[in-house]
Image (cartoon, grey):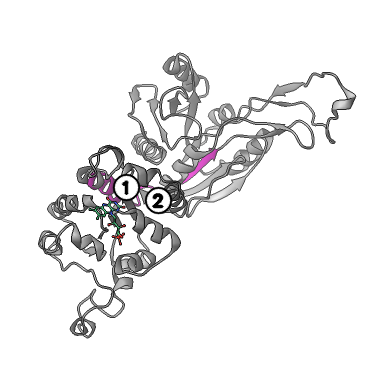
Amino acid sequence: MIGVSGGIAAYKICYLVRYFVRNGAEVRIIMTPSAVNFVSPVTLSALSRNEVIINMFPPADKVSSSEKVETKTWHVNLGLWADVFIIAPATANTLAKINAGISDNFLLTTVLASRCPVFLAPAMDDDMIKNSVTVRNLKSLSASGFKMIEPEYGELASGLVGEGRMAEPERIFEIIKDFLLRTGDLTGRKILVTAGPTAENLDRVRFITNSSTGKMGFAIAEAASDRGAAVTLITGPVNLDTPEGVKRIDVRTADEMFRKVKSNCSKKDLIVMTAAVEDFVPVKTDKGKIKKEEKEKFVFEFRRAVDILEYLGKKKNGYKLIGFALETDDEIENAKKKLKRKNLDMIVSNNPDSEGSGFGTETNKVSFITERKTEQLPLMSKYDVGNAILDRYLKMK
Ligand SMILES: Cc1cc2nc3c(=O)[nH]c(=O)nc-3n(C[C@H](O)[C@H](O)[C@H](O)COP(=O)(O)O)c2cc1C
């Protein structure tokens, strides 16, 4: 199902509909009342071979019809009928309304009534997409489980060049096709993912940690759950919402992470270790607060933390094991050594100095290293990197 809201990019939806119809999909289209100013419902109806729905309230003759979809509560029926709902273009207005739960047109009402995954392809001017209100809405929508089809940088209808150009129809089509093909391909698999940093207390109020935000691990857990896997996510302290359907276990320290991994690693098909576990932890933690009046300077003693990846590599009883390497120098060489040393099936290497990569970013540029080959991937969203990792896992012998 495709929802069209009122932006210039609406004309491009004709191509999107054609890609789907040509590939055998049944397409139903809903337009906002504004959208009809940008593309003709007649064109979209002809291309989709279905009536286009614009108005919230069907004409009286439709209400009494026995047709499958056109009944009194057709927003609910359509929401249940669709395998996937794509809002493209998604205007700033429609995004804001979805985020607020407003349902004052047929498209918005159907979004609320949908059980299928809803994809949003934002399209707007550079200033609109960078506006803090839109940024907040997009962030909140992602956290609520809506799937973003990221806009591109390029020429905009206003004549400006910048962010906010809707992803090209071909790209939207490929994203949805991949999503539908992957649906359910991990059903029955049990996957353990670790994410985030660990934090080690120095005294009652102070601690050391690292810059990991957990986004990569959470994205892998989300992708695996979307594809039907039973996912357990063990995470250090992060500020992220739990992906739908994922069992989350919160820990704080490296020792706690180890204990939880140990008790949750059996009967897993795949373990992906993305957590940035502290390598060194304090030998002892001061129970109170270290007072500055008592010391001019002092030495803190650290010990090596348990190497969880090494433990899992040695134990390996039936699961595939994928680790991450964050390297700033000799990225590939060092990752290859780690692959061998830790008995991994694949290592995902990334360099925090590469643009769009590393801590806190929404994207990542990674390399996949196995015993047989090294593959360099382009800059991708962390969710797409997650899917690519899972694709490689499915091909492992
Ligand atoms: C010529 C023109 C082009 C527009 N293009 C966009 C656009 O690309 N993105 C956007 O968010 N709003 C755009 N707008 C504003 C929306 O049409 C307007 O906010 C409208 O209320 C959206 O309604 P809807 O979200 O219900 O479709 C445009 C308006 C005009 C007049």
Q: Quadrant of ligand 1?
A: bottom left
Residue 29: % across, % down: 21, 63
Picture residue at 26% right of the left edge, 43% below the top? 167
Identify which residue is drawn at 31% across, 54% down: 91
- Image height of 18 relative to 304, above or below: below
**What quarter of the picture does the C terminus occupy?**
top left
Q: Which mark is residue 226?
A: 2
Q: Nearer the viewer, residue 394 or 150?
A: 150
Per the rendered image, the range of residues in magenta is 173-195
Which amino acid lies under the numbered mark 1 shown in the image of this protein? Answer: Arg
Using residue 319 as the reference point, say whether residue 379 is left or right of it: left
Tell me which corner region of the image, top left, top right, bottom left or bottom right, holds residue 295: top right
Give yes or no for residue 348 being in the magenta stretch. Answer: no
Q: Are marks 2 and 1 in contact (CB under 8 Å)?
A: yes
- Residue in view at x 19 percent, y 60 percent: 37
Which quarter of the rendered picture does the N terminus lie within? bottom left
Q: Is residue 117 visible?
A: no
The CA distance from mark 2 to mark 1 is 9 Å
Q: Which mark is residue 182?
A: 1
Q: Counting residues from the N terminus, which is met first, the one under dot 2 or under dot 1?
A: 1
Percent position of residue 362, x then y: 43, 38
Whole-percent x and y of residue 260? 63, 41
Looking at the image, residue 368 lies above or below residue 67: above
Give SS at disc 2. Answer: helix
Left or right: residue 256 versus residue 114 is: right
Q: Residues within 10 Å of mark 1 (few under 14, many from 20)?
A: some
Classify 295 as above or below 285.
above
Compared with residue 104, is residue 338 higher up or lower down, i.e. above or below? above
Q: Quadrant of residue 333?
A: top left
Whether residue 54 is visible, yes or no, is yes
Q: Give the amino acid type for the residue marked by disc 2 in the picture.
A: Asp
* Residue visible at 52% across and 34% down in the picture: 273
